[in-house]
Image (tube, rainbow, N blue to C red):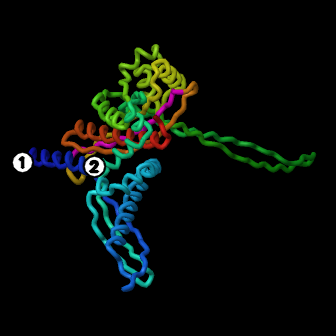
Amino acid sequence: MQMIRSLLIAFLMLFGAQALAATATAKGQATVKYESSLFGKKVTPEVRAQAVLQAQLKAIDKYYAEAGDSQSQNLDAIREKVKADPDRYILETAILNEDDRPDMGQFTVTIRATLNVSQLNNAVKASSAAGQAANGGQKSKLTFIFVSRQTDSSQRFDDREYQAVELKAQGKASRSGGQYRESVETGGSTTRKATKKTYAIFPSNYLKSVFNGVFAGAGFKVVDAAYLEPYTKGLLKIKNVEADFKSGNDLQPQTERNVAAGLQNAKVPYIAYGTLDVRLADTDPATGMFRVSVAATGKLLDASDAIPETKAEVGPIQAAGLGPTEEEAQVNALKKAAEDVARELLSQMTNAGIK
């Protein structure tokens, strides 16, 4: 019975997560002015339809605004598409409230819209510079290296306190005796040192399909970093990137310079790279299943010019996954984090006109 319950929860989580990933709900409100007629002021079907359409657009605006600045900017590129065919991007519209003010000649409607996020994302991809280039037969090359890791050791340093004592003496002396006054001034400082961490790197080749799907779907020609290495004249090495991320949160300057030079040798202009930090598992109170959280960071380096430049940077982005076992929860969390960081990078790339 327990096994059936676990399988049922896993089934609901799988398809429920897919549904949540494909749709979203948001509220919108719009007010439309209307003119009086021979029979007095009244709301026509055309005015009501116009108000509902504007409210739907406001709902989409709200959804993208809550998603972040980069996502909100992406909406500007597809706004006309949404206006031309709202039914393609809005699955359902529920009227929450209508307010007709004949004395003012205005009609206000409040709606709750179910958005087709998949179609919205596809429209964003198609409007991106890379997507337009892909439609024209030209694709920009891009590779990626993301390292999955977990804290292996953490060394915390105690605070160091330094004390300083200054002794002052004042007085006068005579043959018959003397008078003296002493004062003591104390001071000091405390030095703190950051916690030193090292990480254990573990393989996660199954994430390649996640990153490849996001970037290739946006029109980039994705090149596997392992196949790219031989064409970089030994400068781009996956093991060197992993070594840097084993003890730090960014690439060493020399490693980054080598990566950029290697990309230029291979004639691949872009590389996305970053980390996926896996936290310790705990128990989800709602389902009783294992829950694992992941913090993801990412950068996009443009090596198309002589002087490389970081074009996008995101994170840390928090994601979580559930599963009947700790391993399954970890895999689900990593996949979610990988997709989130890739999509946020893609949003910034779209805004920057990268192609």
Q: Can residue 282 be seen in this view?
A: yes
Quadrant for residue 167, please give it: top right
Closer to the observer: label 2 or label 1? 2
Q: Is residue 152 visible?
A: no
Quadrant for residue 32, please give it: bottom left
The residue range painted magenta reads 289-304
Which amino acid, by three-letter code, is at mark 2?
Answer: Ala
Which amino acid, by three-letter code, is at mark 1?
Answer: Met
Q: Name the residue under label 2.
A: 22
Please name whichever residue, 227 or 333, is drawn nearer the observer in this view of the structure: 227
Task: Give the spatial CA distance, label 2 vs label 1.
Answer: 32 Å
Q: Disc 1 on helix, strand or loop?
A: loop
Residue 136 percent across, percent down from the top left: 39, 33
The residue at the point 31 percent across, 58 percent down is 25
The residue at the point 91 percent across, 48 percent down is 176
Residue 221's place in the image compared with 214, above or below, is above
Residue 83 percent across, percent down from the top left: 38, 57
Residue 1's label in the rendered image is 1
Horizontal relation, residue 245 to residue 180: left or right:
left
Please name whichever residue, 223 or 204, is drawn nearer the observer in this view of the structure: 223
Q: Disc 2 on helix, strand or loop?
A: helix
The first of marks 2 and 1 along the sequence is 1
In the displayed orientation, state which residue is furthest to the right: 175
Residue 171 percent across, percent down from the top left: 86, 48
